[in-house]
Image (cartoon, rainbow, N blue to C red):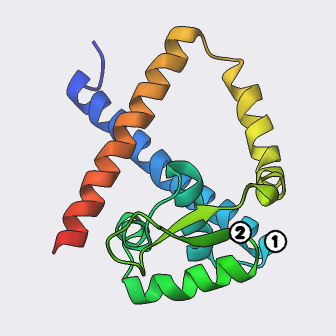
Amino acid sequence: MSSTSPGRDRRRTVTVIKDALRELRNQLSLLNHQVSRRLELKDVDLDCLELVLEHGPMTPGELARRAGLHPATLTGILDRLQRAGWVTRERDPQAADRRAVTVRALKDRNAELFGLYAGMNSALDGLFEGYSEAELALLADFLRRTAELGRTATEELAGD
């Protein structure tokens, strides 16, 4: 007879997964910090740049909402990113408000950014080789669903 119950084993495994997710968050945060340092950006600048790269052109207001930042804070971030050649702010001639702008990432510096993540991306490719297609599908689903839970939790905290 086993000395532990299935419920206790499951709780331990869930705890190990949650601990691993916290460690992953910490390690990715440290990696992003090093990337920011190399690019001579603040961490929050890199976060905003990555949002624009991931989601495409958007208004400063939309970027502020996605980043969870006050619009006045975002102005300084966009000023730094524009001075450094990462983004441009373009007037929207179709907008009712003639002051309306769209933030767009400048693609000519993408290779520099992606190059800093190349080591991690190569290491992940090697790691993925050890998994079957079914295991990769399970991991992809878990990470997608976990990210969605994170978005929901963030929105709930931001709404308070």
Q: Position of residue 23 (x, y in %)?
A: 53, 54
Front residue of this view, candidates 77 and 37: 77
Check whether the beta carbons of the residues at disc 1 and disc 2 lie within 8 A of each other. no
Q: Secondary structure at mark 2?
A: loop
Q: Residue at x 41, y 89 (%)?
A: 72
Q: Amino acid at mark 2?
A: Trp
The label number, if any, that marks residue 86 in the structure image:
2
Front residue of this view, candidates 25 and 101: 101
* Direction from residue 46 to residue 40 in the image, left or right: right
Q: Residue at x 41, y 63 (%)?
A: 94
User: Which mark's residue is nearer the viewer, 1 or 2?
Assistant: 2
For the residues labelled 1 and 2, the Cα–Cα distance comes to 14 Å
In the displayed structure, 14 sits above or below 57; it is: above
In the displayed structure, 16 sits above or below 69; it is: above
Q: Secondary structure at mark 1?
A: helix
Q: Position of residue 28 (x, y in %)?
A: 61, 56
Query: Crowding near pointer 1: few (<14 within 10 Å), some, many (20+)?
Result: few
Q: Position of residue 87 (x, y in %)?
A: 65, 69
The label number, if any, that marks residue 38 in the structure image:
1
